[in-house]
Structure formats: C-alpha cells, structure tokens
Image (tube, rainbow, N blue to C red):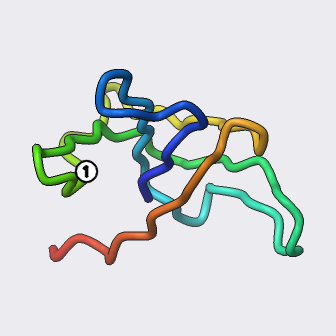
C-alpha cells in the first residue's frame, strides 16, 4: 500500500509505503480508521506522479498511521515472487 498523508504536495512529499499482511490492521466500517502496516517500505514518485514501493526497511518494522493523517490510500498488487 501507499498512503498519501494530509498535506502531500510535490514540494513537500508526504508518502508512506508498506506491506499490508496478516500482522496488519485496519477497521472495516465506512468511517475513517487508523492503519497499521506490518512492513514499512520506501516510496518513490517520478516526475509523472507514478508511485512505487522500493526497498523494505532493515531491520523490518511496521508503521502506525492515524486516520486523521490519511488523505488517500493506494492498494498495489502483490509483488511477483
């Protein structure tokens, strides 16, 4: 997943990437919910606005994001193994 945080702009990028898996958590009602991603990853955005996840952090660690900070979520297909 790629999470665009409130206030994201080209001049001030605010993107968080990570893997959503069995150890991740998010609510399931229509209201906003906090999000926990089990594996934090770096996000790159090119000049055309194309975003992709790059390297996972080492050592592996998760990331908690409060609902108030989330502007948009992008769900990416699983990586080919």
- Under circle 1, the secondary element is strand
Q: Is residue 45 left or right of residue 42?
A: left
Label 1 sits on residue: 53
The x and y percentages for residue 19 are 43, 55
Q: Nearer the viewer, residue 50 or 16?
A: 50
The x and y percentages for residue 36 are 65, 47
Which image quadrant for residue 7? top right
The x and y percentages for residue 74 are 45, 64
Quadrant placement of the N terminus: bottom left
Q: Nearer the viewer, residue 35 or 70?
A: 70
How many other residues sit within 10 Å of disc 1, few (<14), some (14-19) or many (≥20)? some
For residue 16, above or below residue 12:
below
Residue drawn 71% across the image and 57% down it: 25
Residue drawn 77% across the image and 45% down it: 67
Residue drawn 61% across the image and 48% down it: 71
Q: Which residue is situated farthest in the left direction here?
A: 47
Which image quadrant for residue 56? top left
Q: Nearer the viewer, residue 50 or 66?
A: 50
The x and y percentages for residue 10 are 30, 32
For residue 10, above or below residue 29:
above
């Amino acid at each position: 997943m790629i999470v665009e945080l409130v206030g994201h702009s080209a001049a001030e990028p605010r993107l968080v990437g990570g893997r959503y898996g069995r150890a991740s958590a998010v609510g399931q009602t229509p209201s906003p919910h906090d999000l926990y991603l089990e594996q934090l990853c770096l996000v790159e955005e090119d000049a055309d606005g194309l975003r992709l996840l790059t390297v996972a952090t080492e050592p592996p660690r998760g990331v908690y994001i409060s609902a108030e900070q989330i502007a948009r979520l992008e769900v990416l297909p699983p990586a080919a193994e």
